[in-house]
Every structure is written in C-alpha cells, then in structure tokens.
Image (spheres, rainbow, N blue to C red):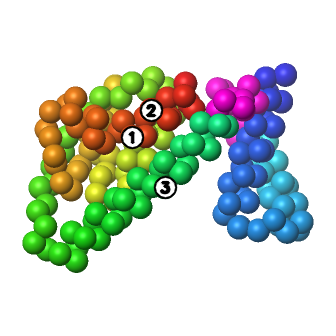
Amino acid sequence: MKAISRFIFLVLVFLLVWTVWTGTLRLDELLTGVFLSMVISAFTFKFFPGAGLHLITPKRIGYLLVYIPVFLWEMVKANIDVARRVLMPSLPIRPGIVKVKTNLKTEIGKLLLSNSITLTPGTFTVDVKGNHLYIHWIEVESMEEKEATKLIPWRFERWLKEFIQ
C-alpha cells in the first residue's frame, strides 16, 4: 500500500512540474504529462521512501500557498536591491560568508531553505553542515550568527517549518 501511495504521490508531483514547465492545460499536453509522469514514477518511486499521499494535507497546501507569495516578494525585493547596486556603483558592497542556524530538521527542509536563499539575488548558500548554513551575502549586515539568522533564512524558514515538518 505504501508503494502505491508513493507512486501516486510522485505522479502528481511530476505532473505538476510538467504542467508548470509546459505552461498549458491543453488536453494533449496533460495526457502526455500523465503518461510521462507515470513512466518516470514507475522507475523512481523506490528511491523516495519518505514520499506518499500522507504528505498532501490541507494544512501543508495552505502553508505552501502562503510561502509562494512570500518567496516571490523576497525575490522581487532582492532583485531591486541588486539592480540598484549595479546601476549605482557608489552603493556599498561588503561581500562575505556568514554562518546561520536553521531549526529545520529534515534534509528536504534544509534543501528547500538553501535553494530559496540561493534563488534570492544577493545571497548564495555555499554549504550546509548539520543545522548550519554558510551563505555568501553581497552586503553583510552582521557577522553574528543570531542576527544573520534573523536577516537571511528566518523570512523563509518560518513558513517552510510548517510546510515541511
């Protein structure tokens, strides 16, 4: 039963990725996506032991729907900041690598957090060791771990914590 749950879950995930990737809801595209999702899931579901339909809950979907606009807003703000620094070279740039702590326990949570940070211009996750992330920051505002944690990952982590854990 768990294998079927993992298979169906992966079909849904791959189909969602396919739909976003193609950007269309045409019937022929959806049928192609369903077929490819089923084929890929048939070969890969055994590599995802933690996956399953139990992960799809209204609470998690709600937090995901909240997280997406939060992430997009942070990305827009960071893009504007980096664009200002490029267009006005007189603005200070103090690059550096800071150590921040995460409260996320799962590997997928840390992966989503580090990718969210990396996709935000001006920051780049260099390494993840245990509960610490090492982030290259275009404008280091604080080298203190607690302060840097409030400034960088906390804006994503508070929503991911509920979505992932």
Q: Earlier in the sequence, mark 1 or mark 3?
A: 3
Q: What's the amino acid at mark 2?
A: Arg
In this rendering, is residue 161 above or below 91? above
Quadrant (top left/top right/bottom left/bottom right) for the C terminus: top right
Q: Name the image quarter holding residue 103.
A: top left
- List the residue tagged with mark 2: 158
Quadrant occupied by the N terminus: top right
Residue lying at 41% horizontally and 57% vertically, measured from the top left:
75
| 112 lies left or right of 48 | left
Vertical position of residue 56 compared to residue 122: above or below: above
- Residue visible at 34% across and 59% down? 78
Going by the numbered disc 3, the residue's amino acid type is Leu
Q: Earlier in the sequence, mark 3 or mark 2?
A: 3
**Which residue corresponds to mark 1?**
155
The residue where tag 3 is placed is 72
Give the magenta part as a residue range: 44-60
Taking the image as shown, residue 128 lies to the left or right of residue 31, namely: left
Pick the residue in front: 52 or 101: 101
- Determine whether label 2 and label 1 are within 8 Å by CB: yes
| In-image side of 19 versus 158 (left or right) | right
Q: Is residue 130 above or below residue 141?
A: above
The residue located at (73%, 60%) in the rendering is 19
Label 3 neighbourhood size at 10 Å, few (<14), some (14-19), many (20+)?
Answer: few
Gap in angstroms between the C-alphas marked 3 and 2: 15 Å
Q: CA distance from mark 2 to mark 1?
A: 6 Å
Q: Horizontal and vertical percent for residue 140?
A: 16, 48
> What secondary structure is found at the residue carrying circle 3?
helix
The amino acid type of the residue labelled 1 equals: Arg
Residue 104: image x %, image y %?
Answer: 43, 26
